[in-house]
């Protein structure tokens, strides 16, 4: 599987996970020119706008969350700010917004196991 296919599969699995946990998907792969991309934008059950970074890896020594760096967090924060400037009506003053990380570990194809998904809030 190519890197883009792995990433797309991870985002699909993350979306299904979030929807099962009562998040409403607002946008996927939202591209902001010269800033970056927001993988998934959702609202949680309490109305908080959540920007979700998805990191996906095939089985190996590293975990997906190991790939979430300070530089990535900084770039994501900037993308969130640009998104919020354009769509401020999506954020209620009471609920606010946050950034989350969903780490997806794909199963070993030789072992019949399910993907492992870990959700970190307020990264």
Image (tube, rainbow, N blue to C red):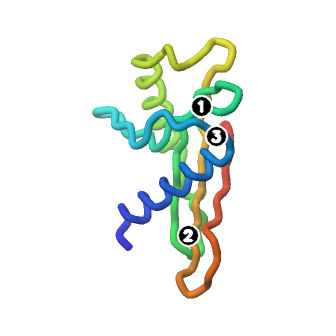
The image quadrant of residue 38 is top left
The image shows residue 53, relative to residue 92, as above or below, that is below
SS at mark 1?
Answer: strand
Identify the residue shown where x is 38% and y is 37%. 30
Sequence order check, earlier mark of 3 and 1: 1
Q: Which residue is mark 1?
A: 43
Tag of residue 65: none
Q: Quadrant of the C terminus?
A: top right
SS at mark 2?
Answer: loop
For this orientation, the residue located farthest to the bottom is 110
Taking depth in this image into account, of 62 and 94 the one nearest to the observer is 94
SS at mark 3?
Answer: loop
Instruction: Indicate the position of residue 22 as horizontal and vertical percent values.
Output: 66, 40
The image shows residue 60, relative to residue 4, as above or below, that is below
Q: Within 10 angstroms of label 3, few (less than 14), some, or many (20 or more) residues?
A: few
The image shows residue 12, relative to residue 39, as above or below, that is below
Identify the residue shown where x is 64% and y is 59%. 117
Sequence order check, earlier mark of 2 and 1: 1
Identify the residue shown where x is 49% and y is 55%. 12
Instruction: Indicate the position of residue 71 as horizontal and vertical percent values.
Output: 48, 43
Instruction: Indicate the position of residue 28 as horizontal and vertical percent values.
Output: 43, 41
Q: CA distance from mark 3 to mark 1?
A: 16 Å
Q: Which residue is mark 2?
A: 106
In front of the other: label 2 or label 1? Answer: 1
Query: Label 1 near label 2: C-beta < 8 Å?
Result: no
Q: Which residue is mark 3?
A: 123
């Amino acid at each position: 599987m190519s890197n883009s296919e792995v990433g797309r599969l991870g985002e699909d699995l993350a979306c299904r996970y979030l929807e099962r946990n009562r998040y409403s998907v607002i946008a996927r792969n939202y591209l902001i020119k010269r800033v970056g991309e927001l993988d998934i934008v959702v609202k949680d059950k309490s109305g908080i706008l959540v920007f979700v970074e998805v990191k996906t890896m095939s089985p190996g020594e590293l975990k997906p969350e190991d790939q979430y760096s300070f530089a990535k967090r900084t770039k994501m924060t900037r993308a969130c700010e640009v998104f919020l400037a354009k769509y401020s009506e999506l954020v209620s003053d009471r609920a606010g917004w946050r950034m989350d990380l969903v780490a997806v570990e794909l199963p070993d194809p030789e072992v019949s196991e399910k993907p492992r998904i870990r959700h970190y809030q307020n990264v």
